[in-house]
Structures are given as structure tokens and as C-alpha cells.
Amino acid sequence: MRAWIRYACRLATVMALALFLFPVAVQAQATAGGASLQIPPGARAEGMGRFFAAVANDAFAPWWNPAGLAFMPGLNAGLMHTKLVPDLADDVYYDYASFSGYLKGWGGIAGTFTYLNYGSSPNTSTDGGADPLGTFSSFEVAPSIAIGTPVVENLGLGLNLKLLHVDLAGDILGSEGTGTTFAVDLGALYQWVKPSDNLFGQGAGDMTVRVGATVANLGPNISLVDERQSDPLPRNLKLGVSWEARVPKSFSLLTGFAIEKSLVFEDIPDSVSQELSFYDRNELLLGGGLEAGFLDMAFGRVGYIYDDPGEIKGWTFGAGFYLKSFGFDFASIPQYKDLSRVSKFSLTAHFK
């Protein structure tokens, strides 16, 4: 009886926060702002095709699906640094750091920090002079706090509350070019584990099926000039399913598929909308892939991303190497149009 009371309290807490924060999501009329909220962290998730909303079992879970924290014991830490356009600029990069802990009987809680640096730009005079007056830097920061808790057996719910601050002009324009807002991610993850006496002919193991859903970046528009020129946040819905079979200290296989739908709605005239395909009109991103692991130490990954509206289509590749409590992951990801592929690296740690 006490367990059901505790589950009810957790569910009531998550739902109360969701009901309070959800009404701030406003229908958008322009291209989404807050680029730092759109960049996926974690080379592992990227290398196998971005279906991680239906996995969410490492330190990068708060971004993909905060409900994953409900099933993550111990302490977990993650760090990623990526140069986004290495062929064009060395000072445009993305950093993400996360740390989570598990509270027995309640679930997991995490803190994350995102930093996107747009690099340095020349400051020219307003009278049309060509000589630069120095340089200024543009950046975004987005700290967050996330919680994930099991509400019934095999089902977890999660919430990730973020603060977003964008500064595109430094001190040059005063308050113009600078904006602050907040956002929330809501997630759900169902996982079903079936023990097996023999998997892959290797011995005892288990099979896990997961289904995940995340509604991300619900929050007020961000204004860098005035409220009439505000931009919506990159609100989106992620749905995914995954299947994993694992024999400890031997072999593992993880595969899955995900669909991502933009929730930023533009005012498209009916005459134009009718000429668009269902896919273009609904801005879907499809992804899937697999991960094969050996001895819980070495992992190979492959996936495919199909994002027609964003003009990103191609294979993803990755690898991971783990020793005791520490892991290193690498991924190679396609980018927009003619930009060369980008390499992503991340570090993780897990302590029981």
C-alpha cells in the first residue's frame, strides 16, 4: 500500500509541473530559435541513428528522454565537445555536460549544462567604414535540472526544466541581441525485460523492449529585439522503439527506430500546403540503426538519418570503448547540404 502511495505522489508531482508549464507553449509563426537546444549530445546516440529516446540509459538521457533517469542506478556523468563546422571555423563549438544520481525508491535526478559558441565576429562601424573596431563573441547557454521516476512497474515519467540564455551581440547593441527564456521536456519510457537461459548460444542473458516518447522544448518564445519579433523554441515530439539482447561479459545487440516531428507550426497558405507532400508538410525526421557490443568493452554502431526538410540524409557510424567505469564514444554524422561530415566525441562514467 505504501508503494502505491509513493507512486501516486510521484505521478502527481510530475503531472502538476507539466500542467503548470505546458500552457506556456505558444504556436509559432517563424523559424525556431535556440539552436543549442537542437543539437543532440552523446556520440553513442548519434552513431546509431538517433533512436535514443527509446533507450536513454546513460548520462545524456536528460536531453533525449528524462524518463530514462527512472531506470538508471548509481552515479552517471557525461561530457561532450564538438567542433560543428571544422572546415569553416575552429571557434564554433558545442559543449554538453551532465551528472545524475539515483535516489532509492524515488528515481533519478540530473543536472546538465549546454554551451554553444558561435565564435568571434568583427565589429564594424555604423557609418559604413570597412575597418573593424574589434571583435565580439556570440553564444548560448542552457543549464537544466531533470527528474525521472517510475510511476508503475516498467513505466517511468520524466521532466527536464531548462533555462536558455542567448547573446548574439555582446555589449555592442546593449539589450538587443540578447534574450532569456525557459523550456521543459516531458518524457515517458516503458521497458519490459525478459530473462533468458540462452542467448546467441552464449548463456544466460536478457532481452529488453523499450518504447519512449518525448515532447521537447515547450516554453515561451525567445525575444532578441522585442516581443513582436520573437522566435519560437524548437519544440518537437520524439517517438521511438528499441530491442536489446544482452549476455553479460559476452555479446550484446541493440537496434531501434525513431520518428521526430517538429511542433513549430508556420502559417503556410492552403494553396502552397496542398502542393507539399505529407512528409514535407509535417517535417518528420526518421532515424534508426543498431549497436553490437563485445565483452561489454567494445561497441560498433551504424545508423541512417533521413531528414528531407532539413536536407540531411546519410549514414551514421560510431564506436565505443569501455573500461570498468569509464567509456569513450565516437560518431561520424552527416550534415546540412554540402557541409562535410562532423565527428563527435563523448566521455561517460558510471559508478554503482
Image (cartoon, grey):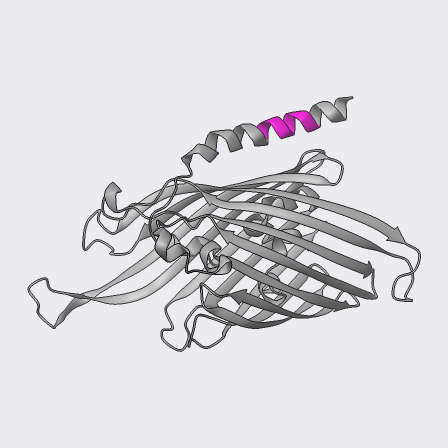
At a point 60% along the width and 51% down the height, the residue shown is 239
Q: State how many labels appear.
A: 0
What residue is rendered at 71% in x and 39% in y? 155
- Horizontally, residue 161 falls left or right of residue 89, namely right
Q: Is residue 171 magenta?
A: no
x and y percent of residue 206 in the render?
Answer: 84, 54
Indicate left or right for 186 with 56 as reference.
left
Report if residue 56 is visible in the image. Answer: no
Assign the magenta stretch its main secondary structure. Answer: helix
Can you say whether 311 is above or below 224 in the image?
below
Q: Nearer the viewer, residue 114 or 151?
A: 151
Which sits in the foreground, 19 or 37? 19
Relative image position of residue 24 (x, y in whole percent): 41, 35
Q: Is residue 10 magenta?
A: yes
Of residues 206 and 77, which is closer to you in this image? 206
Image quarter in which the N terminus is found: top right
User: Horizontally, is 125 left or right of 325 in the view?
Assistant: left
Report the magenta residues as a range. 7-13
How far across and how far down the image is residue 95, in percent? 46, 60
For this rendering, which residue is in front, 206 or 82? 206
x and y percent of residue 80 in the render? Answer: 53, 61
